[in-house]
Amino acid sequence: MRSSGANQLLGSRLSLNGLLLCFIAVLALVAILGPSSSKTLYSVDSSPIPIFYKNYRRLKEQATSDFLEIRSLSLGIARSREFDLCGKERENFVPCYNVSANLAAGLHDGNEFDRRCEKTLVGLGCLVRPPKDYKIPLRWPSGKDVIWSGNVKITKDQFLSSGSMTKRLMLLEENQIAFHSEDGINIDGVKDYSRQIAEMIGLGSDSEFLRAGVRTVLDINCGFGSFGAHLFSLKLMTVCIAAYEVFGSQVQMALERGLPAMIGNFFSRQLPYPSLSYDMVHCAQCDINWDAKDGTFLIEVDRVLKPGGYFVLTSPTSKPLGTNAKKKTMFASIEEFTQKICWSLLAQQDETFIWQKTSHSHCYTTRNLDGAPAICKEDYDDQSYYQPIRTCISGTTSKRWVSVQNRSTGSQLSSKQLEVHGVHPEDFYEDSQFWASALTNYWSLLTPLIFSDHPKRPGDEDPLPPFNMIRNVMDMNAHYGGFNAAFMETRKSAWVMNVVPISTTNTLPLILDRGFAGALHDWCEPFPTYPRTYDMLHANGLLSHLLSSDRCDATDLFLEMDRILRPEGWVVICDKVHVIEKARVLATQVRWEARVIELQNDNDQRLLVCQKPFLKK
């Protein structure tokens, strides 16, 4: 009995001693952080001038991390085990695309490549690891022209035997694929081709595309992205879409080069863009039978094409002699159908045809052609998230029906344009100011981590401007696209995929009208891209929104984020305190290095800054 009582007394004294030690630790913590703020462990100024890096930055961050660890334990949040790495068969896994299963289900004629997410395919419970030969991509702009062959799903033999003279002429030395000749000139004639298109439109050169109202281009089945890479140099936002491919993926290749791309096709479903989205739609040898299905594919192009926009079609240049009659019949049927949807053949040169969509919506009501598609009875512009493809003309009654030639060229919309989108100019201006300041703070926060804290790889030097450590950026909850605009205003050499969750207000039409890239998406599902395709993921308020719904699993979301993030890539999450605490635990599970940062003048918001390590088995 005496021994038992002594043990209880000793245990109580140990507990008291433990509490006393914790109390002393907190007092020491406050003393270390100074008298400026006893409540703020780490602050980020909301003003454009960042003030967060001092000599004791590391100490403060470690103190914050230790404090949150103690707080998590006190709240009963136990440390969860880290996820294991997936097997080798998952190295290039893209959820929702299972061609063999679709074929077994009887799908054909291109429908086997459709995206099908009826069952949850994200919840693998493991981390998709990089291939054995994976290497960190070369930094922009070098990475635009040279990639590591081990980073994409194509072997050297497949690359050389792919049947294209252009691809065989590309430099292929050791483990690199180059997209230019030794003297730095593109060897696929893309510059001449771009200039030819400009002249066919009536421009002096392709440098005048912007002046003609062409800012955004949708490139269907873009090959290796050379056309988009050239248009990017002309400050045109060019997005590549291509169907899912088991080997030699066009989308994966373009993203590896740091160019905008996403998996997409419209064999049976609409693209995840609203009506009137792009100034130009381009198809060069894209292997689509445009005269099939009674012109349904052309109707989908008409849907996403803005008034006065252009459809550029370049047919294969090498066809067997016996198919000339078939080609003539095909183009005759296309020409006949384009008249029924109010397109006019603007020019034809060699194998390239350019049609222009009408700028006058009344054309559709004055047609007297047999077999002309009807106008859609209801306006479904607001939601076009993989809806079944339609055979009627849409967008004709939209307030956004404005000719591309009459649109402003800048990303800052006028009051009249904002009114069309139902946005108050003051709200838009405040959003722009907020993100200009926030990006300045983000960059000041990341720069020391990238260039100072981050260990250099052997033989690697700190990149200097314009070489950039971050090129592909995804804003997972884009709102008005203010984050993207801030990147442009500060002239960062990065592009942003602006994702608008389908459960929020659909602001994608506004984002696209600003000349940015974007898509609708349901974050309860995987994003249509290949693994390791983005350098940075940004989410502001997204987790709070998703956690309020029972449909989404936060663990699946973090596994998906890890899948699409490149090794050594960054994640920046801004959200409420209790959400960030949960997110930090999940970040630990997916093996990210995570730091929580307080925001000055906002006690209810926190930043979670994470970096994905380069994991190999």
Image: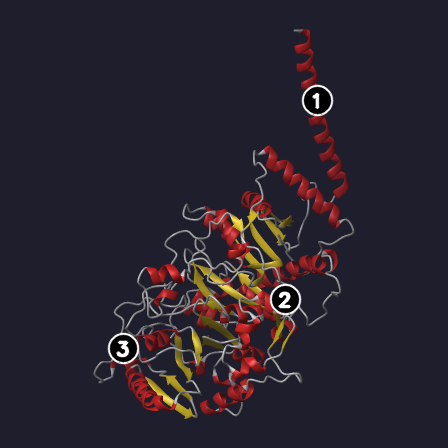
User: Is residue 339 something that shows in the picture?
Assistant: yes
Q: How crowded is mark 1: few (under 14 residues within 10 Å), some or many (20 or more)?
A: few
In whole angstroms, how far apart are the C-alphas of marks 1 and 3?
A: 81 Å
Q: Which residue is drawn at 49% across and 92% down?
A: 199
Q: Quadrant of the N terminus?
A: top right
What kind of residue is marked 3?
Answer: Asp
Of labels 1 and 3, earlier in sequence is 1
Q: Residues within 10 Å of mark 2 (few under 14, many from 20)?
A: some
Q: Which of 111 and 54 is in front in this view?
A: 111
Residue 19's x, y, as percent?
Answer: 69, 27
Q: Residue 14 carries which label?
A: 1
Q: Which of 552 and 116 is in front in this view?
A: 116
What kind of residue is marked 2?
Answer: Pro
Of labels 1 and 2, earlier in sequence is 1
Q: Name the residue under label 3.
A: 294
State the image quarter where residue 51 is shown.
bottom right
Callout in the foreground (1, 3): 3
| Residues marked 1 and 3 touching at CB (< 8 Å) | no
Q: Relative to 426, does residue 177 appear above or below in the rendering?
A: below
Q: Which mark is residue 137?
A: 2
In the shown orientation, is residue 288 left or right of residue 370?
A: right
Residue 142's x, y, as percent?
Answer: 65, 73
| Residues marked 3 and 2 touching at CB (< 8 Å) | no
Please, what secondary structure does the residue beneath circle 3 have?
A: helix
In the shown orientation, is residue 239 left or right of residue 372?
A: right
In the shown orientation, is residue 391 left or right of residue 281?
A: left
In whole angstroms, how far apart are the C-alphas of marks 3 and 2?
A: 44 Å
Q: Which mark is residue 615?
A: none
Q: Which residue is drawn at 21% across and 83% down?
A: 370
